[in-house]
Amino acid sequence: MANFLQKGNKFSIGGEFAKNTFFLFFGSMVANVLNYGYHLVIGRQVSVSVYGEAESIISLIAIVSVPATTLAMVATKYAAACKADNNKKGSREIWLYLNKNIFKFGLPIFVLMVFLTPVIGNFLNIESNWALSVVWLVMYVSFFNAINNGLLSGWQKFKKSSISSMTFAVIRLLSGGVLVGAGLALGGIVGSMILAVVAVYVVTFFMLKINILKKTNDLETHCESKVDFQALKKFIIPVFFGNLAITILGNADMVLAKHNLDEFSAGQYGALFVVAKIIFFGTGVVASVLFSMSSEKNHKGDSSKNILQTALVLVLVASGCATLIYFINPALILSFLYGSKYASVAPYLGWFAIAVSLFSVANVIFQYLLSKHRTQVAYALLTIAIIMVLSIVVFGSSISAIIAIVIGFQALSVIICGFYTLRLKKKN
């Protein structure tokens, strides 16, 4: 009887995980199609060199948004705990606390980055200081968006999270197409980004206002749960370093390709980077659902091992199939998306897919470990990421060399994450 109940629990967990993944996957796939439409629009409208510059800036945004990603994960984890306790008042306290600290610490960071714009632009060979300044503004607004989306994910409002993703994609695609089509080129690209992040903030704020931030006196009267802000503060630092590591592992090669390679080769690398990242964008929703559900289970003291197993199976199957397709006919894929101007680098696409698949697996395990409050892995991954960056700077003189370096370090990341997971099982 006990075995039957255990199996029933597994099916229940798997069904709930699949349902949540479906909602987030559907929204993310719609958003990803629109996002790739955005890349294709600008990729066809601008020159190869400008496209490389644009992809370098987009990757830079991902890296400087690490604090935002950290805020989203912290908000998700503690909102998931509030959900487990049915504590909406606690979620409002988290929202107010994090927003207050963004104003306190985020604004000085924004001002500092504006002053550093000429130095960063010179390193990345980006001449437009105005475009880089807009990047820092996008970063700052993204902090607020991260809190909103984190709370929605923590309460497992994945339908609403999907609407947020689609809002960003629609606004960026439409505004980007108009602005770039009007001849603004790089200025139009960064302009579309700031319009999109502002739109997302408006949408997510009203979603929270209706569902979570709205005061409900009856609920608050019966809920005695408190938010442990001291634990929250201690959790932020390792999560920040972990997200910094994951973001560097996933984006530094594109940024450094702009630094190491000539303009034309950097543009080619950008095309490979975007197409191969389809794998990560397609499987990334699995990690998001895993983190939210596993955080809730961990707060309740329940096992989330089955959630990890389900997530790994989904990611391995999806990424394996995509990689196989990329090896079979890479030229067709690149020509369909970009035309013939990137055909010469088609043989690299399958190998790039291996790198992205390994990265996707590492990200899933990393999110699982953080949901279990096992943060030591963050520092190990950051060490790997730093060594990878130095290796690319020194040895990444060609597209093939950069891809080989990335594959090696992504594989090492999977091994390290697996090691920490095995240690977790032994302790339990």
Image (cartoon, helix red, strand yellow):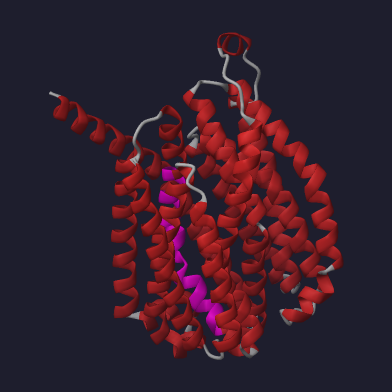
| Quadrant of the rendering where the N terminus is positioned | top left
**Tag count in the figure?**
0
Q: Is residue 215 visible?
A: yes
| Whole-percent x, y for residue 164 in the image | 58, 44
Quarter of the rendering containing residue 133: bottom right
Q: Residue at x 67, y 70 (%)?
A: 57
Residue, far front = 427
283 left or right of 9?
A: right
| Whole-percent x, y for residue 182 in the image | 74, 70
The answer to whether 122 is drawn above or below residue 415 in the figure is: below
Q: Residue at x 55, y 88 (%)?
A: 395
Quarter of the rendering containing residue 202: top right
Q: Nearer the viewer, residue 165 or 351?
A: 351
| Quadrant of the rendering where the C terminus is positioned | top left
Magenta stretch holds residue 282: yes
Instruction: Report the span colored magenta.
Output: 268-290
The answer to whether 152 is drawn above or below residue 56 in the figure is: above
Magenta stretch holds residue 304: no
| Whole-percent x, y for residue 390 in the image | 59, 79
Q: Residue at x 19, y 33 (%)?
A: 7
Q: Nearer the viewer, residue 386 or 253?
A: 386
